[in-house]
Amino acid sequence: MGIDGGPRTAVVIGAGVVGLSTAWFLQERGVEVTVVDRDGVASGASWGNAGWLSPGLAIPLNEPGVLRYGLRSLMDPAAPLHVPVTPDVRLWSFLTRFALNCGWKSWGRAVRANLPFNEECLEAFDVLTSNGVEAATVEAPIMAAFETPRQAVSLLHELQRINGSGLHIEYTALEGDDLARQAPQLSAHAKAGVRLDGQRYVDPGAFTRSLADSVVARGGTIRSGFRVTGVDEASGRLTVRSGAGDSVSADAVVLATGAWLNRLGKDWGVRVPVQAGRGYSFTVPTDQPVPGPIYLPAVRVACTPYQGKLRVAGTMEFRDADAPLYPKRVEAIIESARPLLAGVSWEERTDTWVGPRPVTPDGRPLIGATRAPGRYVAGGHGMWGFTHGPITGRMLAEQITTGKQPLALRDLDPTR
């Protein structure tokens, strides 16, 4: 430990955007950091996601409409929200808890808990990009598109509720020629839209790798192929062990393993289950340059400019985090998005990917100290791990080094 009682060294388990952000901000506070990961940098959800930095859409999943929609589409393998028929008791236990939290009271609590993260998330990205992280963030509005003006009402009401919670989101409803001019990739079937201003996007894989490069340039160590099997304590030091017999010791350990968080976290007093909500993505060429992100709320599809093409991401599939990619889920995304998009070469898709997003049943992440001394958790962000990754790292680094829980983390206690 340091002279002031804070840790001098830390091990971060997980080399995604949340873990690497925590490592970076720990370095800002003088902590020597080692990051370990079973596969490598950006090997999980940090690579294939839509790359949105979108405080305007970082809305908890557990709103009542999702429950109604989920019950209707439960057994439909082509539905954007899909639960496979399975005897998995843990999955059904999670879904039961999730359903119990799909009310406006629980949803509102999750909105308020996420409010400080939405307010400060873009600033945290600016801190990184101004101090060694070379990947750029791109400012652009997100255009939500609908087949009818009536379909847009649900999103407009949701945005009104978010603004009522204290976060100010600027948005504009559009129809007809105004919509077509601002989003040339939308087809004639798109009759209504909502433009959300003040948003950004990134190439998520490139950003995460640049963040890793910055951690290493500042003296950190990143070890890939390190499959953690346990954490031992002796004489006030923590030792992280791997299945290959390797180990690394430090004063503090941070668990940032996304959808795999419960495998170690349950031994540290983390009682909230984290379920893999798997998302799929792929890349397709377009006839015209894509000016900014496009969101298709009715079919839960997010589209982002990506390396001169269009990355298409979607679906929420509650399945084991390590299950293989199911091609029918990709086909379902294409069939649902095709009517609303024009000039897209669907048959030339590349980079087809599936990755697990860590979903909690109450819509609140798990960030902070656990019941095991010196052990901390950062995860459970659902679909918004990239948007909230850097601000999570900054707040958690403050708690680790000072021993004081920031006010913003009180409702996100991982032992709740």
Image: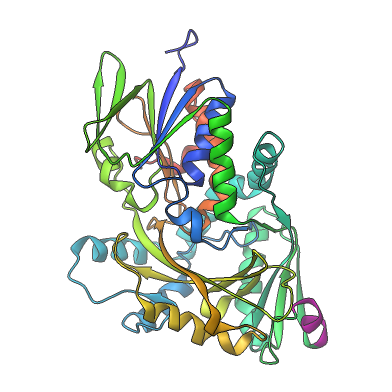
Q: State the quadrant of the C terminus.
A: top left
Image quadrant assignment for residue 29? top right
The residue positioned 44% from the left and 42% from the top of the image is 15
Q: Main secondary structure of the magenta part?
A: helix
Residue 286 to residue 103: above or below: below
**Colouring used for the render:** rainbow
Name the one closer to the observer, 374 or 270: 374
Image quadrant assignment for residue 24? top right
Q: State the quadrant of the N terminus.
A: top left
What segment is highlighted magenta in the picture? 177-183
The residue positioned 65% from the left and 44% from the top of the image is 125
Residue 133 is left or right of residue 274, and the answer is right
* Residue at the top extreme of this rendering: 3
Residue 328 to residue 360: above or below: below
Asked whether 235 falls inside the magenta stretch, the response is no
Please provide percent x and percent y for residue 299: 52, 80
Please provide percent x and percent y for residue 376: 39, 33
Residue 138 in sight here: yes
Name the one closer to the observer, 342 or 255: 342
* Residue at the bottom extreme of this rendering: 188
Name the one closer to the observer, 236 or 219: 219
Residue 282 is left or right of residue 344, and the answer is left
Residue 109 in sight here: no
Image quadrant assignment for residue 160? bottom right
Q: In this figure, what is the number of numbered marks?
A: 0
The residue positioned 51% from the left and 46% from the top of the image is 17
Please provide percent x and percent y for residue 367: 44, 40
Residue 70 to residue 227: above or below: below
Residue 9 to residue 215: above or below: above
